[in-house]
Amino acid sequence: MESDEMSIGANSQNGFASNPNMKIVADYNVALQVLKSEFFEIPNLYNYLERLEQATGMSFEMSRCFVNASPFFLENERHKLLRQVAVGFLSHSKLKRWDSFFSEQIKDIINDLPGDRDFDLVANVGMPIFDKIARPLLGVYPSNRKDFDRIATVLQRMVEPMLPLKQRIQSEADFRNLINMLEEATVEAGPGCDNRVKGLPAASLLEHVQMEKPFDQLTCYAFVTAMYAALAPLVQTAVNMLALIYTENSGRAISAAEFDAQFDRFLHLATAPKYIHRIALKSTAIGGSHFSKGTTVLIDIQRAVVTSPENKQISRHMDFGFGTHFCVGAMLSKRILKELVPLFMQRFPALNAHQKAVDTELNVAYAYKFYSVSPVAASY
Amino acid sequence: MSSQQNSYQDIVNFILDNVAKLCKQPRDILSEDTLLATVGVDSLNAVLLCGKIEDEFELEIEPIVMFQYKTAKDVANALINMNQK
């Protein structure tokens, strides 16, 4: 496999570094203090959308609804409650019930890959994670799955610090469309039926939130859609990890034991999200770095690490965020990657990479648009 | 003045007129060398300004350009270069 052009963590800062209102933090200890400090908060996207509405006279009602129903933004009571639901649903004990289901779905994904011709790691390995795992787990059954996935799987772009106005307007229409597709499916399924699928090991997240918490239907739909979209980093990380392993080993797979031993390193190097964002609420100095009030802090996930002096391995990192905003899907992501990647390597001991393209329009994550490979026949 | 210079001056004036309106600054304190971030061009204003440039000049432009190029002069030159590619 030829060398990888993605250069994860090496650059891709886009214009952020040249923006005086933005500061990239690459030191782990400074990053840690920023994340622990009460003087830094998560960017208030809701408030930004309100200001955008005032300035343009346009409505971003649905975008605000999604921000309000996503457990990743803000820290009000509603978000805490939604986060509790998500954390509880994706806890170790709850995920355990889905164990054999996940294994079956992962096997399907790998077995569906052609053994004798080219395929795309993004379309054929990454994207099916949405359909085969995220959809049943979260209960996301829209009237048109293909259209829904085309929009929902790239919602991640909405959190970009400066999305062009035209794209913001398009996102607003997309959000409305996504909710419509979920509502239509509920109507088609008949009253009292929330698209439950028989034969699943436990209630989906949608069923869970509808039963457990006092949220209206719109909020429930926006919540599960946001959670569905939030699996994009897992999909991207899975592809990055496969690309990384085969590239590092000249197109060959490694053993399951070797993968296990190096899992944390692979995970760090393949992690898709680029930054953790915070806003300075007041002018503050941390470890020699000065943050003016209003500065957007971008913690560089690839570079803000602590390396052990003994074995040069990364001993501390922020691949899944930190503290109260630690990634709610971290356990699920590791669970999927630890099974999917070895199974893939078992099926494909050697691969040739053909065409690949990094998604350069995506400023918030390292991701490929496509990564075409062909299996190499085993030689005896 | 060449047509390219006309375009350059049009873009610079358009940027500065709109920066004055968006950031509530007197137009006469703004020049082509004014650092846009220092007169109030933040993320929101960059997005709004780029939306107006797109409508006026039919050029697709990412808001981050306002921070990469810092002044109206640099932004205008960047836009002209982008348009020529």
Image: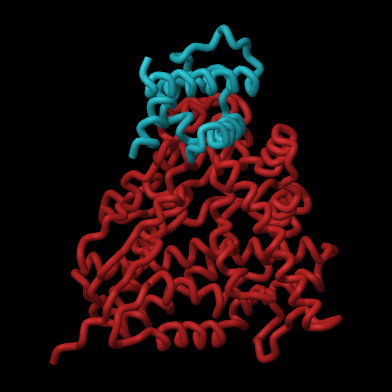
Chain colours: A red, B cyan
From this view, report whether residue A178 is shown above or below residue B53: below
Find residue A360 and report its horizontal and vertical position in percent.
40, 51
Identify the residue at horizontal 23%, vertical 74% (top origin).
Answer: A352
Left or right of A63? Residue B8 is: left
Name the foreground residue: B81 vs A31.
B81
From this view, report whether residue A210 is shown above or below residue A67: below
Could you say which quadrant of the image residue A340 lies in?
A: bottom left
Q: Is residue A79 visible?
A: no
Residue at the left extreme of this rendering? A380
Identify the residue at horizontal 36%, vertical 57% (top origin).
Answer: A358
Could you say which quadrant of the image residue A190 lies in?
A: bottom right
Q: Dividing the image into 4 quarters, which one contains the C terminus of chain A? A: bottom left
Left or right of A160? Residue A76 is: right
From this view, report whether residue A379 is shown above or below residue A373: below
Find residue A244 and report its horizontal and vertical position in percent.
30, 64
Q: Dividing the image into 4 quarters, which one contains the N terminus of chain A? A: bottom left
Left or right of A178? Residue A243 is: left
From this view, report whether residue A122 is shown above or below residue A380: above
Name the foreground residue: A159 vs B11.
B11
Left or right of A318? Residue A117 is: left
Q: Is residue B48 visible?
A: yes
Find residue A99 and report its horizontal and vertical position in percent.
55, 83
Identify the residue at horizontal 32%, vertical 85% (top origin).
Answer: A347
Find residue A27 and report its horizontal and vertical position in percent.
40, 39
Identify the residue at horizontal 72%, vertical 49% (top origin).
Answer: A64
